[in-house]
Image (spheres, grey):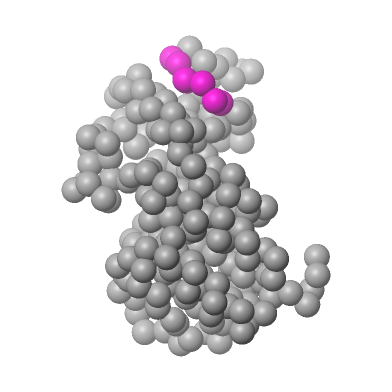
Amino acid sequence: MNNRRKNLVVLSGAGVSAESGLRTFRDSDGLWEGYEVTEVATPRAWRRNPQLVLDFYNMRRKDVAAAEPNAAHTGLAALEKDFNVTIITQNIDDLHERGGSSRVLHLHGEIFKMRSEYDEHILYEIREDMKIGDRDEHGHQLRPAIVWFEEPVPKIEEALPIVHTADIFVVIGTSLVVYPAAGLLHYVDPATPKFIVDKRIPSTSPMENLFRIEKPATEGIIELTNRLQSMR
């Protein structure tokens, strides 16, 4: 790694993928593609109706496979030419990777992975539909490798040291209401330049060196890139 290059850490959210056609429940009055979150994205939902949960995520997997990276994804990847970029994403899709980013940490899991119901560390790739009866090597049912509501977020422990290395910190396409991810902004050194890029800038507590770009991610990435040129 070239140590003369600055570390640029990015926290990305659903607003980035929304411009590729992937919706979230926050864009649709508390419904996610017609479902209440409690029906399809909690451990209770899994215990109550695992087939419904699998059907829901099977459809989400198809949606992601059909989607394409947008200008925000490719724009963030292009910043690797001038910075050591690490993306910490709340998104479960692979559009950052397909857009060209080489270092991506998925806080909330990945749609193209499935995990053992009893051991989150037993993971398998999945491109087709998941089914009741799909089991790990110990005979346990497999479930989506997604961090559901009401579950801990283990990857946050990996994210914190990355945030502490940031010379520049960018928040893009997130409402900053889903914790603990939203709290990462408060772990950034006060002297570090911080940018928030979103079509509706979320309210934040007063903070030093905070710059706002109130535009959709695909437009905001252009202004962000221009501003970062003087910080290389």
Magenta span covers which residues?
Answer: 126-132
Q: Quadrant of residue 191?
A: bottom right
Location of residue 197 by image quarter: bottom left
Indicate left or right for 139 with 55 as reference.
right
Q: Which residue occupies 43% across, 72% down?
A: 196
Residue 183 in sight from this viewpoint:
no
Judge by depth and name the residue closer to the eye, 55 or 221: 221
Residue found 19% across the figure and 48% down from its top? 29
Residue 124 in the image: x percent, y percent?
61, 28
Count of numbered labels shown in the rendering? 0
User: Residue 66 colored magenta?
Assistant: no
Q: Is 5 drawn above or below residue 174 in the view shown?
A: below
128 magenta-colored:
yes
Give the prevailing secondary structure in the magenta stretch: loop
Name the foreground residue: 46 vs 129: 129
Residue 224 in view: yes
18 vs 83: above or below: above
Q: Position of residue 146 (x, y in %)?
A: 47, 38
Residue 221: x and y in percent read 49, 66
Residue farthest to the right? 2
Residue beneath the point at 39% across and 51% down: 19
Assign the C terminus to one quadrant of the image.
bottom right
Q: Quadrant of the N terminus?
A: bottom right
**Above/below status of 192 relative to 162:** below
Relative to 82, 52 lies left or right: left
Question: Between residues 200 and 70, which one lies in front from this camera angle?
Answer: 70
Q: Residue furthest top?
A: 133
Residue at the spot x=67%, y=63% of the render? 80
